[in-house]
Amino acid sequence: MKIIKAPNGFGGITKLSGKRRRPFWVRITTGWEIENGKAKQKFQTLGYYATRKEALLALGEYNSNPTDLTKKGITFKEVFEIWGTKHFEKFPSSEKSLRPVFEKYCSKLHDMSMEDIKTIHLQNVLDDVKHLSASTHHRIKNIMANSFKYCLENDILQKDYSQFVKITTEAESRKEENFFTKSDIQKLMKSDPDEIILVLLHTGLRIGELFNLKIEHIHLKERYMEVHGTKTKNANRIVPIHKDIIPIIEKNMETGSYLFSNSKGNKMDYSSYTKKKFKPFMDELGFTQTPHATRHTFISLMDAAGVSSNSVTLKRIVGHANSNVTHHYTHKEIEELIEAIDKLKIM
């Protein structure tokens, strides 16, 4: 065993005896302890290397950018749990959508060290579920991206391989199909769609936001609604009421606590509505769109009407910009939102 000396506190390289593929043992100094009245360095293994040059480079790189070795070898699952603990405290609703996806579709990565995960491992996970929806793919990629972001922020890794992962073509095509074309809308409107579909198409609301909408949050005379979003704080916003759905809003404000209630007067259930009403109606028309298609369609139609999808106005209406309801909207700002939404023509 031959010890190659380095500056004090820098660490050390030891060449181990015998025939070994990686004989150079690199240790770094983690502290000092007193033994028999003398100060003695405490070491921790950095790694094993094939050549002295590789060992020196690794030791030099560590000293120029030290990492917490207690986190070396941390697994994908461990990172998710650490990151998720803080994220889910801030956004509790996101756990319901992300954790099942992590458990079911990212299992191949669970026990892998973050240091060993490369682009091919991440891409294989997505390719294995190419038959699933685009939203599921994006949730998987979101988990990957945040896991690597955590490692970068904590000096566990130096490279983010999640940025090279691509959503599969099949999933992306499904995403592109999840809106109503002009001919779809014509067919839909001639088939007497229910009031929920009409309100969704004229507001860009997520269906969950619509079902959460209480009568007390609707200001019909002033033509706006206080929407308490289901996604992020940016989803909390003021949404103007389109002139064409004023009769629908007015009619449904007469009964119950919510704008739309079930037969028992309680808040409408998404699964029940989709299964019993929305999907049968889509099947009847030969459509495959989901309720979320109304939101994509609203944004597209507003853009076609001259309210750009990149504009602050449209972003505020759909909750893509910071428009928290705690912000005081001036009368002029609300008028501008109303003016913008009235440009929309469904038929």
Image: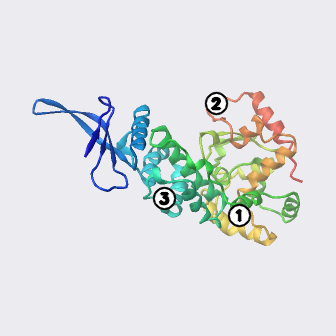
**Percent x, y for residue 16?**
28, 49
Residue at disc 1, secondary structure = helix
Q: Which mark is residue 33?
A: none
Residue, x 48% and y 43% (percent of image)?
Answer: 157
Q: Which mark is residue 109?
A: 3
Identity, as a three-letter code, of the amino acid under mark 3: Leu
Label total for image: 3
**Percent x, y for residue 11?**
32, 35
- Tag 1 residue: 170
Please tell me which residue lies in front, 235 or 136: 136
Note whether 115 is above or below 189 in the view shown.
Answer: above
Identity, as a three-letter code, of the amino acid under mark 1: Glu
Identity, as a three-letter code, of the amino acid under mark 2: His
**Percent x, y for residue 264?**
60, 62
Residue at disc 3, secondary structure = helix
* CB contact under 8 Å: marks 2 and 3: no
**Percent x, y for residue 254?**
70, 51
Residue, x 81% and y 41% (percent of image)?
Answer: 341
- Tag 2 residue: 327
Residue 139 seen in the current view: yes
Residue at disc 2, secondary structure = loop
| Mark 1 or 2, nearer chain start | 1
| Mark 3 or 1, nearer chain start | 3
For the residues labelled 3 and 1, the Cα–Cα distance comes to 23 Å
Assess disc 2: are there few (<14), some (14-19) or many (≥20) residues with their C-alpha within 10 Å of its C-alpha: few
| Left or right: 18 in relation to 89 | left
